[in-house]
Image (spheres, rainbow, N blue to C red):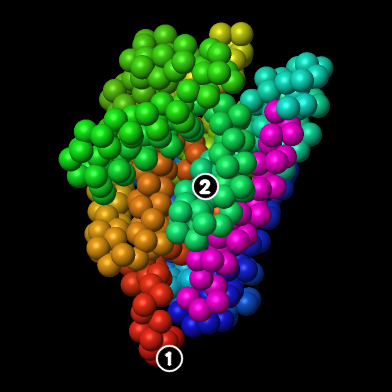
């Protein structure tokens, strides 16, 4: 990828970062489209335009297939819901459209790290302020942790409505912190911003996000450096102590957090849990009437995905222009009653994400089929192991910046999978789009070895590389 294209991708990332952190959810869903238009105008990339045409044609064929399939099975296919899926899955569509190595020349890791440090510092300080003012004044009808929304929900706490900004900020902060680790450990820069961001993440108290992060770190560490931990009892003890030190403050700030953590144990096993009920009805009951679910699913936007919920007219509790404002037959028969029971019983479930009867993995299964879901798992495993190979190579060459980035990319893949068990986060562009742009850039460059950190004693080799670029 040439110098200008790298610059244009960096500009696109900056735009995505700014827009997703604004307090406008609608813009969050539109930002991948805005970024694509900007990138096409700036880069004049024929390959990206060609990919856009191909994906458009492929998606048209897919929709046509589902329309015919639903006619055969005697059910209506809501094409407007399928169109909305293009917006909700816009983050991944954008990633598929762009190709190449994005972070060469002056648009290297240091440039990305600089803007991530600023973003983390601003969001962290705003989040800490939001927590502090709610906790100290006691004048607002909202839990202090729920008030931590950064600029995504700057003054949401005034109205006492927690909204969704709390989770979106937490996910963004996870990506920011993960990719700032090389900046902190290798370059010894941005340490203050990193710590402020980490404090804000912990104050936010989004337990399922924090647990997903810890789980992803443990899994990635086991896959990439298990010898580091298990070959030495002292290191193992140190790792356990570090984990406790990270989790313990949550128990101090939020006294009931560990009691709440028990919910995770019964989330998918307790028959009174909305998630258990919806999984049972979707995976076991629904295929008896719609057997093609296992093979190809119901089609995009036809079940409890974010596109299906938004298009139903029930999600926003009002008529939404340009949407179908209706519910598909499978969703009406197997999903809507559970969702309605959950949303109307806030005293019992408290609008908790952990209880919501929908999440990305279930949506993918119901709308695209078990075959596609399994293929997605296999592809994810391949990506994680490719980054493991890159990590080991860079570490053996003492290229620690690239090694930490390889670890971060692998952790990000596991993290995306982890949060997919709780909500339709894979369709929440405001939460994942900047992180995906970082993953795309660093993954591409790490795989091609163009992003390797050049050690001080290899300056001459660096000059040779630059002269060939």
Queried whether the magenta region covers residue 376, the answer comes back as: no
Judged left or right of residue 161, residue 183 is left
Q: Within the magenta stretch, is there residue 129?
A: yes
Q: Residues within 10 Å of mark 1 (few under 14, many from 20)?
A: few
Rendered-image quadrant of the C terminus: bottom left
- Mark earlier in primary sequence (2, 1): 2
Q: Nearer the viewer, residue 298 or 282?
A: 282
Magenta highlight: main SS: helix
Q: Position of residue 366 (x, y in %)?
A: 37, 35
Residue 194 appears in the rendering:
yes
> Left of 291 or right of it: where is 402?
right
The residue nearer to you, when weighing 386 against 361, is 386
Is residue 274 visible in the rendered structure shown here?
no
Figure quadrant of residue 24: top right
The stretch of residues the image draws in magenta is: 104-131
Q: How many marks?
A: 2
Q: Say which residue label 2 marks.
A: 177
Quadrant for the N terminus in the image: bottom left
For residue 288, what is the image quadrant?
top left
Looking at the picture, does residue 124 appear above or below residue 352? below
Residue drawn at the location 59% of the way across and 15% of the way down: 350
Whether the residues at callouts 2 and 1 have beta carbons within 8 Å, the answer is no
Q: Position of residue 193 (x, y in %)?
A: 62, 48
What is the number of the mark on residue 161?
Answer: none
Local SS, label 1: helix
């Amino acid at each position: 990828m040439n110098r200008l294209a790298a610059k244009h991708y960096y500009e696109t990332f900056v735009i995505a970062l700014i827009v997703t952190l604004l307090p406008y959810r609608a813009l969050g869903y539109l930002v991948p489209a805005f970024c694509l238009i900007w990138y096409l105008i700036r880069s004049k990339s024929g390959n990206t335009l060609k990919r856009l045409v191909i994906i458009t044609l492929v998606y048209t064929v897919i929709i046509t297939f589902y329309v015919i399939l639903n006619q055969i099975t005697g059910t209506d296919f809501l094409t407007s819901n399928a169109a909305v899926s293009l917006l909700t899955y816009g983050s991944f569509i954008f990633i598929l459209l762009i190709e190449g190595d994005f972070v060469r020349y002056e648009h290297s890791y240091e440039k990305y790290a600089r803007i991530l440090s600023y973003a983390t510092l601003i969001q962290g300080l705003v989040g800490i302020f939001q927590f502090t003012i709610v906790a100290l004044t006691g004048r607002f009808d909202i839990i202090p942790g729920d008030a931590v929304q950064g600029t995504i929900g700057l003054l949401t706490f005034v109205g006492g409505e927690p909204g969704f900004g709390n989770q979106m900020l937490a996910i963004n902060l996870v990506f920011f912190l993960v990719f700032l680790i090389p900046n902190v450990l290798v370059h010894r820069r941005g340490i203050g911003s990193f710590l402020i961001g980490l404090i804000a993440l912990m104050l936010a108290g989004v337990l399922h996000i924090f647990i997903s992060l810890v789980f992803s770190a443990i899994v990635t560490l086991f896959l990439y450096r298990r010898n580091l931990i298990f070959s030495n009892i002292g290191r193992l003890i140190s790792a356990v102590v570090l984990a406790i030190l990270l989790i313990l403050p949550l128990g101090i700030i939020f006294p009931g957090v560990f009691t709440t953590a028990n919910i995770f144990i019964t989330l998918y096993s307790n028959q009174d849990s909305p998630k258990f009920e919806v999984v049972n009805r979707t995976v076991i009951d629904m295929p008896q009437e719609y057997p093609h679910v296992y093979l190809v699913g119901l089609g995009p936007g036809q079940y409890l995905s974010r596109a299906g919920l938004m298009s139903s007219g029930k999600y926003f509790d009002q008529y939404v222009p340009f949407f179908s404002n209706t519910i598909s037959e499978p969703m009406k028969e197997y999903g809507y009653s559970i969702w309605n029971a959950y949303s109307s019983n806030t005293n019992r479930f408290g609008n908790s994400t952990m209880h919501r009867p929908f999440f990305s993995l279930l949506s993918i299964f119901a709308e695209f089929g078990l075959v596609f879901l399994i293929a997605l798992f296999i592809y994810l495993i391949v990506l994680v192991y490719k980054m493991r190979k890159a990590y080991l190579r860079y570490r053996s060459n003492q290229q620690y910046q690239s090694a930490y980035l390889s670890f971060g990319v692998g952790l990000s893949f596991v993290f995306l999978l982890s949060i997919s068990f709780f909500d339709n986060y894979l369709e929440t562009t405001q939460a994942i789009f900047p992180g995906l742009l970082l993953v795309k850039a660093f993954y591409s460059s790490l795989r091609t070895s163009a992003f390797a950190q050049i050690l001080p004693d290899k300056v001459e080799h660096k000059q040779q590389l630059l002269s060939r670029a």
